[in-house]
Image (cartoon, grey):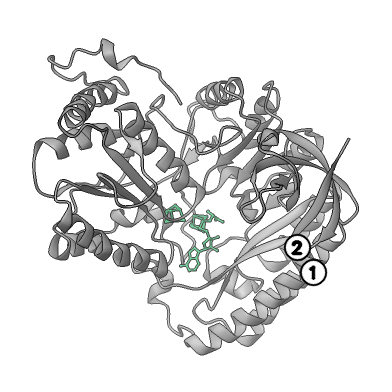
Amino acid sequence: MYNEIDLDKIDISKEPPTDEPARQYYFMAKCREWVREFEKKNGRRPCFFTQTFGCQMNARDSEKLTGILEQIGYVQAESEEADFVIYNTCTVRENANNKVWGRLGYLNTYKKAHPHMKIALCGCMMQEPEVIDKLRRSYPFVDLVFGTHNIYKFAELLTRTFEQPGMLIDVWKGTDKIVEKLPIERKYNFKSGVNVMFGCNNFCSYCIVPYVRGRERSRRPEDILEEIEKLARDGVVEVMLLGQNVNSYGRNLQEPVSFAQLLRQIEKIEGIERIRFMTSHPKDLSDELIEVMADSRKICNHLHLPLQSGSSRILKEMNRQYDKEQYLALIAKIRKAVPDIALTTDIIVGFPGETEEDFGETMDVVRQVGYDSAFTFIYSKRSGTPAAAMERQIPEDVVKERFGRLLKEVQKCAAERARALTGRVEKVLVEEVNEQDEALVTGRMGNNFIVHFPGTEALIGRIVNVKLKECKGFYFYGELTD
Ligand code: SAH
Ligand code: SF4
Ligand code: F3S
């Protein structure tokens, strides 16, 4: 974990500093006093539980929350039966919201029996004014609500929650601020997400992300490199660079840098063995990036390139700014430069106005590309987005039927791609002991496929050669080789 500033050296009898991150470390020192009092009174330290909904960006944010809570003395709990529960929410599809509302009901019951408990909500869903109205009206037991733009202020908000009863809501409409060097507690010792940019400017017509995450802001390359160097010193071998559209990284910096240039710099960091990134928007994927991927020893042999739809007409309605032919031409160019590359994608079924013919175009792209894996989603209407106001929303039964057909095709392609790897020896990063069988460990190849093979805990975090002996559809059984 980062420990940039020693909390013991901070004088909390003084006024808080105004500059960041010093201000947040001051509040962490204050919260720690509160935690110590709790410990004296109860004979144990308070515990916390974080639940992350949504994407890797949110998962990384939760590591920041965890870092702060551990810094002030909280210990991690295994379940929601904790002194402090925080939900980091997602709102990309309706069912993400429903999960949160459902679990809040359960938390309310638990809190009634444990009134000292604190409940906090943060993340993308909290950026929606209707959500805040509903919380105010019907969920008065929630103590703290904040959004995506002020997550760095968590320690300060927590202090206020301890000091004053009632629901504290602090949600910002936007920000141009990036606060560096706050504590982060990583879930894994050997791999880590690294934010390279925040926000999104693309406004795909179905998508709520630009409204809840704000405009694109890139971190300075020197801050990113410093973070990765530190991770490498701590034993991290794989980094996943995170942004809604990493291909537009660096454009809004004072001294613009391209994503490809950033990758070249990261490649030089000793100790980092594998580099991944997510997500690439096809409209911004440059020749320079393809070149860097082809030259690199460390960038994984995997590209996630969301298609969304194979129909040029629907892509236009989606405001994706590429058509079917351009997408396929891009795939051909990438395959030519990096022949072995694994390709994965995101696809939405049932966008307003999608005809059987449009859907057929999506199926056609899926067959032509032969994805190694694909995330398929049923279109979900997000209020406030242009697509929500479009006519001809597609009936549920039609969407479900198409979704079923797509899933079958996607699974067929994926299984064929996987089968073709059988017998090969691949470099595998060992991630964990297999959950079902303790005699096995589970690891991930550069192309993102999973393999289980005999091994012990001692292998976790190491990159080893594994022979792929048996293909089980989407994963393999293998054995360690030299
Ligand atoms: N920035 C990334 C993805 C962000 S959201 C990108 O551009 O690819 C992850 C995926 O959720 C999207 O790729 C899309 O397939 C899906 N998604 C976004 N909004 C959706 C909606 N309203 N309904 C269904 N799926 C959606
Ligand atoms: Fe949403 Fe499009 Fe931005 Fe991705 S690029 S986050 S799909 S608006
Ligand atoms: Fe969800 Fe927010 Fe990610 S809406 S998908 S958690 S950016």
Query: Which secondary structure lies at badge 1?
Result: helix
How far across and how far down the image is residue 413, in percent? 77, 69
The residue under the point 31% across, 42% down is 48
Which image quadrant is residue 132 in? Answer: bottom left
- Horizontal side of 39 relative to 478 (left or right) equals left
- Horizontal side of 36 relative to 275 (left or right) equals left
In the depicted structure, whether residue 400 falls above or below residue 242: below
- Residue under label 1: 368
- Sequence-earlier tag: 2 or 1: 2
Q: Residue furthest top?
A: 9
Q: Quadrant of the C terminus?
A: top right
How far across and how far down the image is residue 209, in percent? 43, 56
Which image quadrant is residue 128 in? Answer: bottom left
Circle nearer the viewer, 2 or 1 = 1
The residue under the point 53% across, 71% down is 317
Foreground pick, 58 / 198: 58
Tell me the amino acid under the disc marked 2: Leu
Mark sitting on residue 328: 2
Whether tag 2 and tag 1 are in contact, CB under 8 A, the answer is yes
Tell me the amino acid under the disc marked 1: Gln
Foreground pick, 283 / 166: 166
Which image quadrant is residue 292 in? Answer: top right
